[in-house]
Amino acid sequence: MKRLNLLVGGPTDLWPESLSNGQVVGDFIGIDRGNLHLIKMGIDPVVAIGDFDSLAAEELQLVKEHVSDIRQSIPEKDDTDTQLGLKVAFDEYDADELVIYGATGGRIDHFLANLWMVLEPRFEKYAPRIKMIDQQNSISFFLPGKYTIDKEIDKKYLAFVCLTPMNSLSLYDEKYRLTDYHVKQPTSWASNEFVGPQASFEFDSGVMCVIQSADLN
């Protein structure tokens, strides 16, 4: 199984502990300033992507000294740097799992662009392979089907976020349940909870975002 990680240039104070401690498994693709963060942690990305407009000249030089495969884009372009990272991860590396860090904090327009990437026809088929993680959230994506997921030990809440209209949504064994519900517009069923160590759900159409989260102390 080929796991890849993508580090976007979001706020470092929102990183999960595993990333801050350098305990993440797998190679990294760095996105813009994310490359600099990785290099400072002693991790050389396999690919560096970005317009690098947020880096000073000496910082960009450091990236060039540590990364052999640099894909420098122009600031004015159709794809975001993160979208370019997804294309490389799936088209060139055929990643079975892509974990994205640094994509959820900072500017809201950046977060929404990252969240909605899975709705693009070119990326939708890869949605189940994509995960976004920060200090208090773990975000996974699902296409139509029936699923059982495991509770993450450090999380309390469970949200079912319908990114699209959805047919026949059922939440079978969560604290708050639904049966064969038709979702007419994008909806966030927030602050649900696991009852046991697992939770099951099913839907017939659309794209689902499932978030396990915890409050920050």
Image (spheres, rainbow, N blue to C red):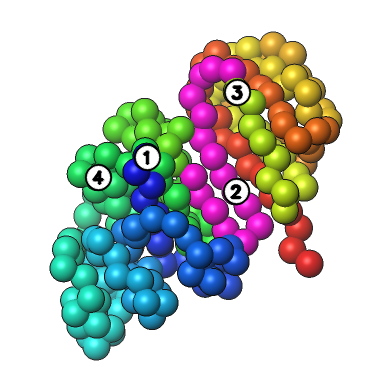
Identified at 58% across, 72% down, the residue is 13
Q: Earlier in the sequence, mark 4 or mark 3?
A: 4
Q: How dense is the environment of label 1, judged by Cα within 10 Å: few (below 14), some, or many (20 and up)?
A: few
Alpha-carbon neighbours of circle 3 within 10 Å: few (<14), some, or many (≥20)? few
Q: Helix or strand or loop: what does disc 1 sit on? A: loop
Q: Is residue 18 above or below residue 38?
A: above
* Placement of 164 over or under 95, stated as above or below: above
Calculate the distance from the C-alpha at mark 2 to the C-alpha at mark 3.
17 Å
- Dot 4: what SS? loop
**Quadrant of the rendered image containing residue 120:** top left
In what element is the residue under mark 3?
A: strand
CB within 8 Å, label 1 to label 4: no
Q: 53 left or right of 112?
A: left
Q: Which residue is mark 3?
A: 147
Q: Which residue is mark 1?
A: 1
Q: Residue at x 29, y 65 (%)?
A: 45
Residue 133 lies within the magenta run: yes
| Location of residue 98 in the rendering, given as x and y in whole percent from the top left corner | 40, 46
Please tell me how crowded label 2 is: few (under 14), some (14-19), or many (20+) other residues with Cα within 10 Å. some
C-alpha gap between disc 1 and disc 3: 20 Å
Magenta residue check for 69: no
Camera-side mark, 1 or 3: 1
Q: Any mark on residue 93, and which?
A: 4
- Which tag, 2 or 1, sits closer to the chain's start? 1
Q: Are the residues at dot 2 and dot 3 in contact (C-beta closer than 8 Å)? A: no
Q: Could you say which disc has been placed on residue 138 in the image?
A: 2
> x%, y% of residue 92?
20, 44
> Disc 4 residue type?
Tyr
The boundaries of the magenta stretch are 131-146
Give whichever of 90, 169 is nearer the camera. Answer: 90
